[in-house]
Image (tube, rainbow, N blue to C red):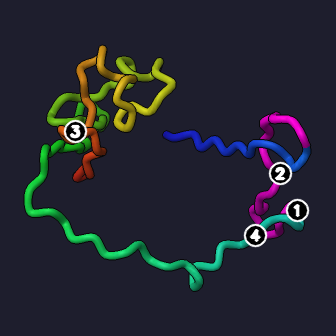
């Protein structure tokens, strides 16, 4: 389960208040505001080609593993159980500091760059 939070800062006036924008599309496809812009995928350009390096600084295995009658995420065969991490507000896998006290499951290279994770489901 994931919660997507979208916030838009400012509304064109002075000040710095944060509000949730009302521009969205209803279930029947009707926009709720004339400011709604439909994404035109035919105009989207792909990311430039970037070859996969032959060697990596590190490899982390992120996969789903059975635990009782449920499946849970595991990083390098260590289960990431919700009760250990659900109190954390920051992202677990993409923040250097949020999980260090909980086992250091960070996925960064020696130079501090984020590692591309291979996900096996």
Which numbered disc, 4 or 2, marks the residue that appears first in the sequence?
Answer: 2
Left or right: where 94 falls relative to 68:
right
**Magenta stretch in the rendered image:** 14-32
Where disc 4 sits, the SS reads loop
Residue 47 is drawn in which quadrant? bottom left
Comparing 56 with 24, the one in front is 56
At horizontal 59% and vertical 83% (from top left) the residue drawn is 43
Residues tagged 2 and 1 counted as in contact (Cβ below 8 A): yes
**Which mark is nearer the camera, 2 or 3?**
2
Q: CA distance from mark 4 to mark 2?
A: 12 Å
Where disc 2 sits, the SS reads loop
**Residue neighbourhood size for the residue with mark 2, other residues' Cα within 10 Å, grouped as few (<14), some (14–19), many (≥20):** few
**Which mark is nearer the camera, 1 or 3?**
1
Which numbered disc, 2 or 1, marks the residue that appears first in the sequence?
Answer: 2
Residue 67 on image: x %, y %: 24, 30
Residue 118 part of the magenta-drawn span = no
Q: CA distance from mark 2 to mark 3?
A: 39 Å
**Residue neighbourhood size for the residue with mark 3, other residues' Cα within 10 Å, grouped as few (<14), some (14–19), many (≥20):** some
Which numbered disc, 4 or 3, marks the residue that appears first in the sequence?
Answer: 4
Residue named by callout 3: 65
Which numbered disc, 1 or 3, marks the residue that appears first in the sequence?
Answer: 1
Q: CA distance from mark 4 to mark 3?
A: 40 Å
Residue named by callout 2: 22
**Which mark is nearer the camera, 4 or 3?**
4
Residue named by callout 1: 33
Residues tagged 4 and 3 counted as in contact (Cβ below 8 A): no
Residue 48 on image: x %, y %: 37, 75
Residue 32 visible, this angle: yes
Residue 3 on image: x %, y %: 57, 39
Residue 15 part of the magenta-drawn span = yes
> Taking 33 as reference, is 105 above or below it?
above
Residue 87 — which label? none
């Amino acid at each position: 389960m994931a919660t997507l939070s979208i916030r838009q800062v400012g509304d064109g006036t002075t000040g710095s208040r944060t509000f949730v924008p009302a521009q969205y599309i209803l279930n029947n496809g009707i926009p709720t505001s004339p400011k709604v812009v439909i994404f035109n995928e035919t105009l989207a350009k792909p990311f430039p080609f970037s070859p996969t390096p032959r060697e990596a600084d590190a490899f982390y295995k992120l996969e789903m593993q059975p635990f009782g009658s449920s499946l849970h995420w595991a990083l390098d065969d260590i289960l990431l159980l919700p009760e250990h991490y659900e109190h954390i507000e920051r992202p677990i896998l993409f923040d250097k500091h949020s999980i260090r006290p909980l086992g250091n499951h960070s996925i960064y290279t020696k130079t501090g760059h984020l590692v591309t994770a291979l996900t096996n489901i």
